[in-house]
Amino acid sequence: MTGSPAATGGRDAFAIRMEGIDKTFGSVRANRGASLEVKPGEIHALVGENGAGKSTLMKILGGLQKPDAGKMAVNGRDVTGWTTSDAIASGIGVVHQHFMLVPTLTVAENIVLGMEPRNGLRFDHAKAVADVEKLSKETGFAVSPNAKVADLSVGEAQRVEILKTLFRGAKILVLDEPTAVLSPPEVKELWGVLRKLRDAGGTIVLITHRLDEVIEISDVITVMRGGQTVDRLKTSDTTPAQIARAMVGRDVVLSSRDEASALGAKVEGDGAPLEGFHPSDDMTSAIRVNDLVVMGSRNTRAVDGVTFSIRPGEILGIAGVEGNGQTELIEALAGLRPIVSGLMRVNGHDVTREDVSARRDAGVSHIPEDRHRRGLILDYTIADNLVLGLQADYTRRGLLNGDRIDENAAKQIEAFDIRPPSSELPARALSGGNQQKVVVAREMGRRFSILLASQPTRGVDVGAIEFIHSQLREARAAGKAVLLVSAELNEILALADRVAVMYRGKLTKVIPIEQADEEMLGEYMTGTRSETAA
Amino acid sequence: MNPVSFLTQMIRIAIPYLFAASGGVIAERAGIISLSLEGYMLTGAFSATLGAHYTGSAWIGLLCGMLGGLVFGLIHAVASIRYKADQVVTGIAINLLAIGVTRFFLKLAFDSSSNSPRIDGFGGNVAAHGFDNPLLWTGLFVAPVLAFLIYRTPFGLRVRAVGEHPAAAESLGIKASAIQYGAVAISGILAALGGVFLALDQHQFTDQMTAGRGFIAVAAVIFGRWDPVRAALACLFFAAAETLQIQLQGNQLIPSQFIEMIPYALTIIALAGVVGRAVPPAALGKKAE
Amino acid sequence: MSSRFRENIEEALFPPIVALLVALICGDLLIMSYGQSPGMVYRLLLEGTWGNAYGFGQVLYKATTLTFTGLAVSMGIRAGLFNVGAESQLAAGGFLAGLVGMGLSPSLPGILAILICMVAALAGGAIVGAIPGWLKVKFGAHEVIVTIMLNFIVLALLNYIVAARIHVPETLHTPEIANGVLPRLESFLPAFHGSAANLTILVALIVAGLSWVYLFKSKRGFEMRAVGLQPEAAEYGGVSVGGAWMRAMIISGAIAGLGGINYVLGYKHYYEEGFAGGSGFLGIAVALVGRNHPVGVVLAALFFATLSQGGLAIHAFVPKQMVEVLQGVVILAVAMSVPEVRAALRRARKPVAA
C-alpha cells in the first residue's frame, strides 16, 4: 500500500518524479516534503481534500511556482525550479482549474499564443487557423478556430485548454479538477479523450477529490494530506473507503450518518411526517419557496423554477455538482441576487422583495460559500467581523457602541472556541477553520429561525468540520430550519433529514434521507436520472 | 471659412493628440493605466528643446525627446509593474514630476521660468511650408501602424492577451511583465513625440506648454474604446472642434469654454454608455498577485 | 492589542520615511547640480518655514487647504473610490462661497454670514462630487476618468461664468464678498503679521476630527470602510454599495469644496480664477502619505505645505521648482513602497493559526 518510492522502478522509468517538495505561502505551508512518482503511459490520480497541497505541487511541476526545497525530474532529467517555458518545452501541459483563456481572443489565437506562426513581421493568422484545424482533426476534438472564447460553453473551453497543451506537443498532461464544471456527457467525453491520449503513449495526472472518478479513470493513485504525500495505491487493488481513509487520515465522516439519522428520526417523531409533506402548508414551514427564478451571471436562468420548504427542526440538504445554480439560489434567498419571479416566505411573511437587512431581521442567517470574498472583511478585527451585518443592532444615534461590540466578541469567541482568542486580531490572521468559526458564530450566535449554510466546511480542518457539524445538529435540535448546500455528498448524507438534488437550475429530486444513497444521488446529480421535484 | 486652412490647422492641432493617444492605447491594451501621457509629452517637449538647442539639429532634438519620454515611461513602468504601485497615483505623480523637472531644468539650463530660447524646427507650419515636417507624416500614420502592431503581429497578440488575462499569458510562458514594459516604453516614446512636435513647431519650450493635451488624449483613448484607429478619429474630431472654435472667434455664437468641454463631456457620455458602452481591457490597472 | 497597534503604525510610517529619504537624496542631487550646498539649502528651507512666524503662518495657510483636499481624497479611498476631482470641487466650493458672500447683506451677523458661505462651499463641492458618484452607481462609469474629465468641464464652466459675467474688469476675480470674512490669525497673534493663515484652520481641524469619528466610530463609516475593503462582503452585511459610494463622493466633494473658504473667506475675500492652483491634485499626495487617516492627513498636509513654502525660502539659491520635483518623488516613492512594506510585514508576521 504505502508505496515506498524507488521500490516501484528505476530512476529513469518515471515520467515525473518529485521528492521532498516544500512550498510556503506567507503563513501557509502548502507542501511539506511532498513527493510524486508517475510512470509514462499511465493515468495517475492525485487526490486529497481541499487544501491538501495538490494544486501547489502541480504548479511547481508546471513551472508556475518555484519550490522552497526538494528535487524534481521529468523523464529522468533534473528540472528543479524550472520556468513555465521550460516545462512547456519539455512536453508538460497543465490544464488549470480556472481556465487560462483570454475571452476576447479567438480559439485559434488562444491556442497559438506564445508560439505564434509568423510570416515576416506579421502574426500569420491563416496559418494559426489551419494548424488548429489540423490538430482538431488529428485528435478528434471539434473546435471552431475563429469563435471567440467568450462565446464558448465550459466544455468547449476545456477542449480548447487541452488542445493548447497538445499544440505545444505535451506528452504529460496535468488536469486540475477538470470535471468540476462539466456536465455528465462532457465528463464521459473527457474520459474518452484521456484514455485515447494515454493509449497513444501520453501520461496524465488528474487532480481530483471525487473518488468515483478516481476509481473509474485512474491506473495509480497518489494521496496527499496536509501538504504531504501519504499514500500511493494501485487503483485495481483499492476501494473508495481505503482512499478516503488515506485522505482524511482516519475513518471517514460517513459513519456519523447513523447518529444523524437517529437525531433526524427524533425530530421526525416530534413534527409532521417527512413524507406526504404539503408545500402549501404555511403553518408548518419556516421557509417556503415557490417557483423561484433567478438569473445567473451569463443572463441564463441559473435557478429555474425551484420550489421547496423547510420545517422548523429540519435540515434540507441540496446536493449537486457545482455550478448547477446552488450559488445563485442561496444568494437569491439571502437577498444578494434579485428574484425574477416566484415567492419566498419566511415564517409566513412574504420577503421576496426585501433586501439583505430585512431578511436578516426576519430571522434569516447565512453562512456564505466564500468566506474570503463575502463572509468576512479580512482586514477588520474579529470583533468587527462578529457584528458584520448586525451593525445596526450595535448602533446608537448613528455611532457604534464599542463596549457592546467588545462584549459580544468576548462572548462569541468563548462560545465558539475561536483561536487565538484575541478580538483585536484581523480576520486575515486566522486559520481557515477559525475564520469559518467567526462566520458561524456571527450567524448562529444570534436570534434566527432559518439558516442558509453554503459549503459550511469548505477548506477547514477536520476539527472545525466536526465542530461546525455539531453546531448544525444543535440548530436543528433547537428548532431551526436549515438549508444545507454542499459539494460533499458525505456531508449531506451525514446531516440532512431530506435531500434534494439540484441539476441545471432545477431540483430534480427531493427525498427523505433514509431513501437516499450515494449512487442514486450521483445519478441525479449527473443528470443520468431525472425527475423534477414537485 | 477656408476649407484648406481649416484642414491644415486641424491637422496641426491633431498631431500631438494622435501621438499621445496612440501611446495611451498601447499601454492600456497591455493593462497599464496611462494618466501619465501629459507628463510624457511635457518631458518630450523639453528634452527635444534641450537637444535641439545644444546641437542645433531638430533631428537630434527629436531623438532626445523620444529618450525623455522613454525615461518617464520606464519610471511609470517600474513603479506599476515591479513595485505594484497604484497606477492612477503613479500616473498623476509622473505628471507632477514632469512639471517640476522641466521647470527646474528650464531654470538651470536657460535661467528662465517661462520659456527657452528659440530653437530650430522642421518648418512645420503647414500653411507656410506645406507638408515638409516628418512628424506631421508620422503623426498621421501612427494610428494605422499601431493598429497593425496590435492586431497583426505576435507582439500585439501578446499585448492584448496580457491586458485581458495576464495569468493566461503567463501560463503559456509569456512574461507578462516584459510585454508590459515594452508597451509602456513604446507609450512613453509615442506620447513624447506629441510633445516634440509641439516644441519644434513653436520653436521653443514654454512652461507647461502641453496644457492638458495629454488628458485630451486620455479622453480620445476612452472615447475610441481602446482601438488605435477609433482613438485617432476621436483625436481628429476633438481637433476639428477646437479649430472651429479658433476660426469662429469673433462671432461668439458659442463661448470658447463650451467648445473646450467637448472632448471631456463626450468621454463621460461614452463611459456612462449612452451610445455604446466603453469597456476597458479586463486587467487594466489590476496588479499581479 | 498593543502589538497589533504597533504593526499598524509600522505599516503606516515606513513608506513616508522611505519616501523622505529618497526625496532628501534627490534634493541633494538637484541642489548640487545648481552648485549649492545641500546642508545650507535645507537649513534655509527649515528657517523660512518653521523658523519664523510669517513663514510658519504661510505653512499653516497652505496646510489648511491641503488638509481639506487630503481628507476629501482619503474619504473616497476609504470607500474604494479614487476621487481625482478635488481640484474642481475645491474651485466650485470657493466659487459658490464667493458668489453667496457677494450677495449677503453687510448687516447680517458675521457668524451667520460665515455659516451661510460655508454651506454654499459645501454644496458647491458636493454637487461636483455627486456627479461622478451617480455616474458610477448608475452606469458603472469609472470615477477616476469621470472626475478628471469633470475637472476640465467645471473649471471651464467657472471660467466662462466669471469671465463673461461677474469679473472685476481687468482682473480674473469676482468682486469682494459683502459679508462672511473669516479673520486672519494675525488679528489674534500679531506675530503672524502678513501671513494668510486664518481661522479656516480651526474649521479644517474640526473637519478632520469629524472625519475620524465618521470613519471609525459611526455605523455609516463602518459600512463605508467595509465597502472600500470588500464590496461583496459589505453587500452581504446588508450595506448598499451604491449608497455608500454615493455618500462617499458627496462627503468627499463637500469637504474639498469647504476648503475653498480658506482663500475666499479667509484670505482674498473673492473668488479668483485658478486659486485652487493644484491643491486638489496635491490632496492625492497628502492622502497617500497620510495613509488615509485623518491624523496622518493633517501631518502630511503640514509636510507638503512646508515643502511648498520652503521652495520660496530657498529660491535665491536654488530654483523653487526643486520642491515640485521632490513632491513628485515623494508620491512615487510612497506609492512604490506601500505594497512592498505591506507584503514584507505580512511575511514577517508569525502565523497565528490555532
Image: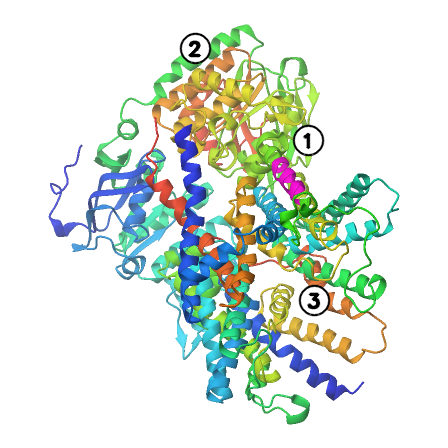
Residue A342: which disc? 1
- Could you tell me which chain the residue with mark 1 belongs to? A
Question: How far apart are the two marked residues, 2 and 3, measured between alpha carbons?
Answer: 72 Å
Residue B52 relative to residue A21: left or right: right
The residue indicated by pointer 2 is: A262
Q: Main secondary structure of the magenta part?
A: helix
Instruction: Give the extent of the magenta segment.
Output: C201-211
Amino acid of disc 2: Ala
Amino acid of disc 3: Pro
Residue B115 relative to residue B272: left or right: left
Foreground: disc 3 or disc 1 = 3
Instruction: Find residue C301 and report its horizontal and vertical position in percent.
Output: 56, 49
Residue B67: which disc? none
Amino acid of disc 1: Gly
Question: How far apart are the two marked residues, 3 and 1, measured between alpha carbons?
Answer: 46 Å
Position of the N terminus of chain C by quadrant? top left
Label 2 secondary element: helix
Residue C205 versus residue A10 in the image, above or below? above
The residue indicated by pointer 3 is: B263
Q: Which one is in front, B273 or B157?
A: B273
Mark 2 crowd level (few <14, some 14–19, many ≥20, 10 Å Cα): few
Residue C353 relative to residue C96: left or right: left
C126 is within the stretch colored magenta:
no
Is any part of residue A282 visible from this angle? yes
**Residue at 54%, 70% in the rendered image:** B103
